[in-house]
Amino acid sequence: MISADSLQVYRNLDIGTAKPSPELRARIPHHLIDILEPTIQFNAGAFVHRAEELIPEIRRRGNTPLVCGGTAYYLRSFITGLPDSPPGNPEIRRKLKTEAEQRGIEALLEELERVDPATRARVQDRDVYRILRALEVYRSSGRPLSAFTNPTAPRQDYQFLLLGLMRERGELYSRIDRRVERMFREGLVGEVSFLLKMGLDFEDPGMRGIGYREFFELRKGCATLASVKRLIQRNSRRYAKRQITFFKSLADVHWLDPEDVDSACALIRSFPAGEGAGSGERGGEGGAP
């Protein structure tokens, strides 16, 4: 199992990210979970590169890699390949971080509005990573990030079987609300408190996800734990709605009821690359993520 979840990569973020249980992870190997400290930025490019390294190893052990999640952009980037935008430039990134500290992120947002209004319209005001990345691309290439193309067709070096699980909307939202209730019973408040005592802040990459960032409302002095819980439930429902829209845009997805295990197994058994696949490269024996 290769996790395509952008928050489960972080250590000590367990309850709020709904990581698979230790019992399940002991029975089925899971990759890309608990690999980074919450202060380190992880992105789609890093995910794709790590997944590409893992797949041949998994195939050599005679197993089939299952990429599961999670973060929609990570999955799409893996299926289609990464966009043609330039790689990161550490020197420019350091200068931008210094400018953000000295001038404030608002000044960088104004610059982004001037040089790349299309990206500015998509990025959230507090999403420091994407703001800096967009300006980094512009300063290093002279072109706005929005001018670079994102691939839309599946890459040719892998064969894909895409299985999507779909629940009725009301049932889905009810399950989300119950899951958040369970997270609070299992100690989410204590987990967030522990992370803050470790020195983490809500600007750290691991703390910007749903289930963590909502606790920032308590610092404003105008929220209760009950209201934070409702906010997490609301934001989770909204995120699920966006995920559904995003995943429906992917081609050739087999949509299944989550309880229909027999149909999922039949699709996997009939998949051409499911038998005899080896290195994960089409030029070899054919990969089957």
Image: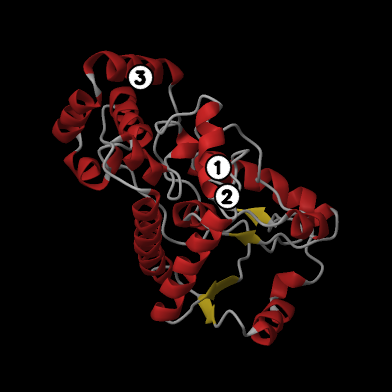
Which one is in front, 207 or 108? Answer: 207
**What kind of residue is marked 3?**
Lys
Which one is in front, 68 or 149? Answer: 68
Q: Earlier in the sequence, mark 3 or mark 1?
A: 3
Disc 3 vs disc 1: which is toward the camera?
1
Which one is in front, 187 or 60? Answer: 187
The image shows residue 281 at horizontal and vertical percentages of 70, 54
Circle 3 — which element?
Answer: helix
- Seen at 51% across and 36% down, the residue is 193
- Mark 3: few/some/many CA within 10 Å (<14, 14-19, 20+): some
The colour scheme used to paint the residues is secondary structure
Reading the image, the residue beneath label 2 is: 187
Give the vertical position of 126 relative to 48 (above or below).
above
Reading the image, the residue beneath label 3 is: 97
The image shows residue 185 at horizontal and vertical percentages of 56, 57
Split into 4 quadrants, where in the image is the N terminus? bottom right
**What kind of residue is marked 2?**
Gly
Horizontal side of residue 162 vs 201, given as left or right: right
